[in-house]
Image (tube, rainbow, N blue to C red):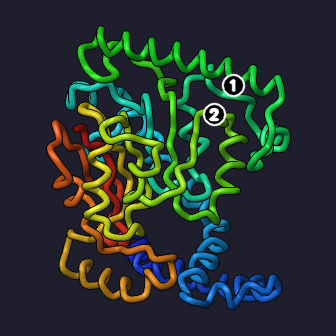
Amino acid sequence: MAILQSASEAFWGLLHPWIFMSVSLSFLPGTLLRLLRARQLLAHLLPSPSRLRDAWFGDFWSAVGPQVREMGEDRVVPLLEGRVHRGQALEDPAVVRGVNGAEPGLRGTVLEIGAGSGMWVGLLGKFVDPRLRKAEGPAAAAANPTTPGGGSTNGERAAAEDRETALEEAMELRQRRGLEGGQLGGGGSSPHTVTRILGVEPNAGHHAELRRRVVEAGLDGVYEIVPVGIEDLAASGKVERGSVDCIVSILCLCSIPEPRRHITELYGYLKPGGKWYVYEHVKCSNSWAMVLYQAIVELFWPHLIGGCHLQRETGKWLREAGPWTSVDLAQPVQEPWWHCVPHITGTLTK
């Protein structure tokens, strides 16, 4: 029975990429009809059909994204809490601290790569100093619409001043901890030490939903959208090189253009002692059979899953991005051999 069960799991696991692509394909007629009714179909086909692909993937991801997030939270939460070591979530973050010599968990200024429509905003908000947060929930989003050019009431200005004061206090506390601990973020552990989040998302089509989720999470004034690509971060004036405490990349490096160059570029924004938190899918390497099978799937996957690529050597490129004091990247221990979309998870410390 155990052999039959294992064989069944392997069969459906190997079939899953094709099922996933077929689900994506099923959204294409609806996207075409929606654009046709809005008289936008031609605009999405010319001069490049990539706009149609983005619209199609957006419709698909709005349906499956929440499921992907739910399935991934068991890995992402311990990662951001600093409890992942060699691909395994540990109960005690102190074990990880003993390995890499730094306080685990998100802190300070966080750069989120590929923010999209805000799938991970709520989770990132759990690490923000509570004094910096507004009211949460859908009612907060409805009561605080983020419309361009909107005016501020006296209450809003007062709230902004309170958050600015809280931010200064949080930064002073964090600096004291750093001096006492003798290293970045050291000298005491707190689950709420993030003071600023910069969400890098060049696709303007995601911004409205991203803003809504930021407000809903109570992060208005803490989470700032950076509406440019990685290559234009410095020119945007939103972030300086060597100023970021943490970079977070969750299932996004698979679809960025020129990934190796952009990963090296992002390395330059980390402070010495800063950490890069990674959860990405990568190229198969466990057997020649799986490498070949993944290569066959890759022939279709990018065209049906919004430009996502399966065979990127993201772990290798991260390691080669620059000098690291510690690298703790590994495949999650629970992933089976037949997984066609294997992952790496862990942290790199500059």
Q: In which quadrant is the N terminus drawn?
A: bottom left
Q: Residue at x 32, y 13 (%)?
A: 187
- The residue at which mark 1 appears reads as 160
| Kind of residue at badge 1 | Ala
Q: In which quadrant is the C terminus drawn?
A: top left
- Residue 70 locus on image (x, y percent): 58, 53
Q: Nearer the viewer, residue 17 or 26?
A: 26
- The residue at which mark 2 appears reads as 221
The answer to whether residue 288 shows anywhere in this view is yes
Q: Residues within 10 Å of mark 2 (few under 14, many from 20)?
A: some
Q: Residues within 10 Å of mark 1 (few under 14, many from 20)?
A: some
Q: Residue at x 61, y 57 (%)?
A: 117
Q: Residue at x 82, y 23 (%)?
A: 155
- Residue 18 locus on image (x, y percent): 48, 83
Q: Nearer the viewer, residue 243 or 174?
A: 243
Residues at circles 1 and 2 in contact by the CB criterion of under 8 Å: yes
Q: CA distance from mark 1 to mark 2?
A: 7 Å
The answer to whether residue 4 shows anywhere in this view is no
Looking at the picture, does residue 196 appear above or below residue 64?
A: above
In the shown orientation, is residue 144 left or right of residue 212? right
Q: Nearer the viewer, residue 100 or 269?
A: 269
| Kind of residue at badge 2 | Gly
Say which element carries label 1: helix
In the shown orientation, is residue 302 left or right of residue 262? right
- Residue 111 locus on image (x, y percent): 44, 43
